[in-house]
């Protein structure tokens, strides 16, 4: 029986082999019947249409190429017009040098340019250089170029329709160049299906022109939507900004991004090893839900570079929550041969020869600005709010007296007298809350440490002033020389503890506190796996945990800096942080996030009453910390109200 089974198995194998060989021979015969196609040279029209798919991606890319040509030609005023989202008409007019009549036929040919000689494709000093733009546009629709070069007695024009150039003809134009593209993708109708709505394309055009305008603040820009004919509706205007480059850039940013950005941003000027970084970075309190207010330029070229954008975000890492994005307008300049601008068809991306140097320059430069301006990260009450709250803006509010109110006016309508002996202005310091004493590392300074003087008028000259009261056991009210400040005590102290904790970690000076009775914390399966996965990182912070049967973990040691706190609550918060951010982030970033969670559990809580000594201690430590203007989650720790603002609120100004 065994022998019979072996023979049967061998026969099945032989028949299978024969079947495979037969199929292979049949397939070979079928493949030999496929006709072999000859290699041939594509005609110019096909080549131009293929190139158009890279250069002419959408209407905004056409405008970008044309405006960059205008800037290369030395234009001081550029007017952009479009119709139907740029699908039916795009027109760019400039007052640049212009093109001589005899060079117009060459200007609309593929790979014809005056900006490079072809011998060096790295040392690029202009925005446009490939010589593809006009030829690609002429291959997609009807392109008309009218130009009068400097010193030329007359203007001339040329038309390219569907890739076919017509003869040069005389034209009427005082100076500069006018490039008009009608019927985008008329020669390639299939591409129209991939464009978005007119509104969406118009929005992208607007954003593109604004980016170009930021790069050239000493050039005037206008943008018109001429859909339906006529002069159209002006969408954007930016006049030439006067002054030095830095001053001109600030004026242009005010026009484009807005007054609030300019008031919240500070200049950056840093150099290293042949690279220069300049521009403006906004404080963490001015942030956005998306990276819509980040404008990045390399050698004057607007780019969307991942290294650039990623490094900026890293510089704000522990100053913003993960769902917020910083705002900045930054220009990186270097020798052209140190950056490759030819890695993207639309020149929107670049590649640096020395990415490490660039990364360090951006990170250090941005971080230093945020550090030096840290105490100015508070949110000042906006002028709009002040104006809205003024008495005359509220018709139902009856103002008793525009001058200084008399005592009778103050108590008018009340059947009572002000109690005798009550001072005109006084705030009783609240008593500290009862509870476990803070650890030595987080305790607030004693009276002697902050001066111990009964008359603390001198403290009003300090940046954050002198504590006068505590509101709702949550907010510290401070009087300054020219106004008042309100501090969120929990948010402020959370930042201070976090910075102390970070300093200890960087110095390898974190002390541990073994627990007399280990804490057993029950977690669900995934949380337990996540936190045990970072147990080694937590051990560096002297938070020692280990597996403890089932779904529990055992905490045997905690950082001494945290003092007494709710260990299970902190462990669960760490699990939530890990679930939200994952464990794939870089080690330093992950440790900073863990420090932030742990610091929150040792900070002064809202609801805890503070003495005047303790409140002043918080203010003084905030003044010594460059990042005390916002908590670890990017929220402001204090707001400022100037005396002039208060007087405006009461109609005194």
Image (cartoon, grey):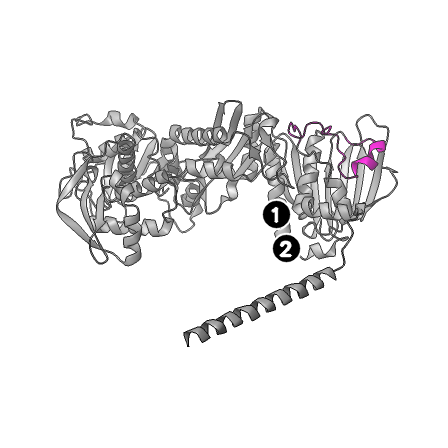
Question: Which range of residues does the magenta coloring cover?
Answer: 98-126
- Residue 342 point in image, percent of width and height: 63, 36
Q: Is residue 298 located in the magenta-colored stretch of the structure? A: no
- Residue 275 point in image, percent of width and height: 53, 25
Quarter assignment of residue 475: top left
Side (left or right) of 167 relative to 578: right
Give me the disc on residue 196: 2
Counting residues from the N terminus, which is met first, the one under dot 1 or under dot 2?
2
Quarter assignment of residue 341: top right
Labelled pair 1, 2 in contact (Cβ < 8 Å):
yes
Q: Is residue 113 located in the magenta-colored stretch of the structure? A: yes
Q: Residue at coordinates 74% horizontally, 45% vertically from top-left? A: 137
Q: Residue at coordinates 26% horizontally, 37% vertically from top-left? A: 497
Side (left or right) of 123 relative to 7: right
**Label 1 SS:** helix
Q: Is residue 411 visible?
A: yes
177 or 173: nearer the viewer: 177
**Label 2 SS:** loop
Q: Residue at coordinates 73% horizontally, 50% vertically from top-left? A: 184
Query: Label 1 to label 2, Cα distance in Å?
Result: 10 Å
56 or 528: nearer the viewer: 528
């Amino acid at each position: 029986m065994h022998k019979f089974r072996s023979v049967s198995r061998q026969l099945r194998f032989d028949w299978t082999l024969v079947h495979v060989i037969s199929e292979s021979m049949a397939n070979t015969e079928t493949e030999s019947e496929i006709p072999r196609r000859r290699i041939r040279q594509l005609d110019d029209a096909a080549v131009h249409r293929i190139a158009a798919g890279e250069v002419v991606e959408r209407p905004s890319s056409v405008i970008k190429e044309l405006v960059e040509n205008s800037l290369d030609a030395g234009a001081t005023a550029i007017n952009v017009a479009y119709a139907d989202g740029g699908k039916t008409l795009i027109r760019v007019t400039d007052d640049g040098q212009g093109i001589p009549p005899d060079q117009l036929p060459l200007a609309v040919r593929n790979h014809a340019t005056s900006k490079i000689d072809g011998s060096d494709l790295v040392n690029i000093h202009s925005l446009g250089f490939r010589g593809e733009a006009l030829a690609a546009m002429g291959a997609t629709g009807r392109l008309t170029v009218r130009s009068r070069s400097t010193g030329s007695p007359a203007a001339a024009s040329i038309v390219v329709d569907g890739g076919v150039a017509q003869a040069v003809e005389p034209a009427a134009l005082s100076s500069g160049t006018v490039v008009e593209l009608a019927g985008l993708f008329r020669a390639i109708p299939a591409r129209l299906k991939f464009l978005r709505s007119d509104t969406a394309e118009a929005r992208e055009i607007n954003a593109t022109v604004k980016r170009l305008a930021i790069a050239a603040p000493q050039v005037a820009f206008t943008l018109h939507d001429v859909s339906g004919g006529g002069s159209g509706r002006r969408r954007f205007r930016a006049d030439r900004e006067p002054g030095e480059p830095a001053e001109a850039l600030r004026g242009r940013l005010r026009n484009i991004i807005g007054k609030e950005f300019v008031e919240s941003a500070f200049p950056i000027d840093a150099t290293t090893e042949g690279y220069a970084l300049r521009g403006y970075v906004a404080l963490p309190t001015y942030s956005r839900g998306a990276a819509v207010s980040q404008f990045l330029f390399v050698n004057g070229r607007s780019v969307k570079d991942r290294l650039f954008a990623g490094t900026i975000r890293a510089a704000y890492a522990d100053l913003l929550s993960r769902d917020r994005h910083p705002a900045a307008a930054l220009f990186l300049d270097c020798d052209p041969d140190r950056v490759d601008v030819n890695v993207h068809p639309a020149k929107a991306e670049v590649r640096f020869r020395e990415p490490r140097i660039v990364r360090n320059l951006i990170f250090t430069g941005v971080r230093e600005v945020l550090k030096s301006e840290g105490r100015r990260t508070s949110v000042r009450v906006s002028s709009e709010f002040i104006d809205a709250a003024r008495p005359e803006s509220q018709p139902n509010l009856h103002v008793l007296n525009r001058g200084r109110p008399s005592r009778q006016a103050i108590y008018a309508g009340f059947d009572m007298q002000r109690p005798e002996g009550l001072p005109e202005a006084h705030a009783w310091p609240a008593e500290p809350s009862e509870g476990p004493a803070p650890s030595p590392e987080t305790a607030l300074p004693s009276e002697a440490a902050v001066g111990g003087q009964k008359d603390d008028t001198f403290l009003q000259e300090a940046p954050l002033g002198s504590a006068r009261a505590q509101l709702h056991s949550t907010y510290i009210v401070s009087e300054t020389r020219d106004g008042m400040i309100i501090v969120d005590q929990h948010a402020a102290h959370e930042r201070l503890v976090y910075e102390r904790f970070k300093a200890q970690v960087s110095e390898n000076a974190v002390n541990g506190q073994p627990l007399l009775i280990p804490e057993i914390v029950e977690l669900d399966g995934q949380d337990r796996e996540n936190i045990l996965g970072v147990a080694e990182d937590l051990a560096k912070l002297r938070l020692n945990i280990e597996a403890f049967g089932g779904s529990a973990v055992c905490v045997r040691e905690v950082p001494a800096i945290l003092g007494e706190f709710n260990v299970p609550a902190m462990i669960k918060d760490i699990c939530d942080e890990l679930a939200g951010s994952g464990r794939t982030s870089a080690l330093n970033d992950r440790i900073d996030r863990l420090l932030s969670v742990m610091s929150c559990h040792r900070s002064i809580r809202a609801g805890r009453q503070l003495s005047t000594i303790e409140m002043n201690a918080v203010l003084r430590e905030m003044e010594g910390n460059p990042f005390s203007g916002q908590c670890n989650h990017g929220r402001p720790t204090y707001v400022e109200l100037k005396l002039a603002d208060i007087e405006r609120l009461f109609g005194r100004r």
